[in-house]
Image (tube, rainbow, N blue to C red):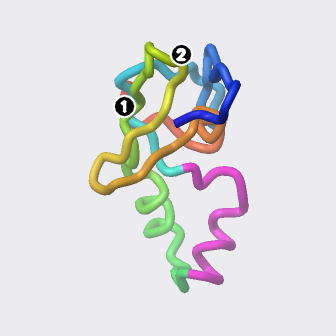
Amino acid sequence: MYFKGGSGIKNPVDFNGVEIKEGDTLTHCWFDCDYIKFFNEHIKITDISEIERRVSRPSVKVKYNSEQGFFYGDGIKESSYMHDFEFKYAKIVTQ
């Protein structure tokens, strides 16, 4: 679903500025905040290597809705969804 009247982002990019295309696999959109602080305080994980392992997990597969003209992320292991405007807070795992 997209917001009523929205047209989607034509050339979405990930956190590193790499263009995202249909079929790419992305992480969750962790990179919009201080994710290390988030894991320390809320999930009680302090081991940096464990945090990096968790935030680098594949989360969504990028698909394109040609009928309405927008990209979106479809959950890989669970029923989840990522809007194209959240892509800039995720990282590409595989292209």
Instruction: Indicate the quadrant where residue 84 lies.
Output: top right
Spatial CA span between label 1 and label 2? 23 Å
At label 1, which amino acid type do we have? Thr
Choose between 54 and 3: the one closer to the eye: 3
What residue is pinned by disc 1?
A: 94
Q: Position of residue 35 (x, y in %)?
A: 64, 63
What residue is pinned by disc 2?
A: 69
**Residue 62 left/right relative to 33:** left
At label 2, which amino acid type do we have? Gly
**Residue 11 left/right relative to 27:** right
Inspect the magenta stretch and tell me whether residue 53 lies in it: no
Q: Taking 21 as reference, is 83 above or below it?
A: below
Residues tagged 1 and 2 counted as in contact (Cβ below 8 A): no
Inspect the magenta stretch and tell me whether residue 34 lies in it: yes
Element class at badge 2: loop
Which stretch did the figure color magenta?
29-42
Could you classify mark 1 by the number of other residues whose Cα lies within 10 Å: few (under 14), some (14-19), or many (20 or more)? few
Q: Position of residue 48 (x, y in %)?
A: 53, 69
Q: Residue furthest front?
A: 4
**Residue 32 left/right relative to 59:** right
Residue located 34% across and 54% down the image: 79
Q: Taking 21 as reference, is 16 above or below it?
A: below
Choose between 65 and 87: the one closer to the eye: 65
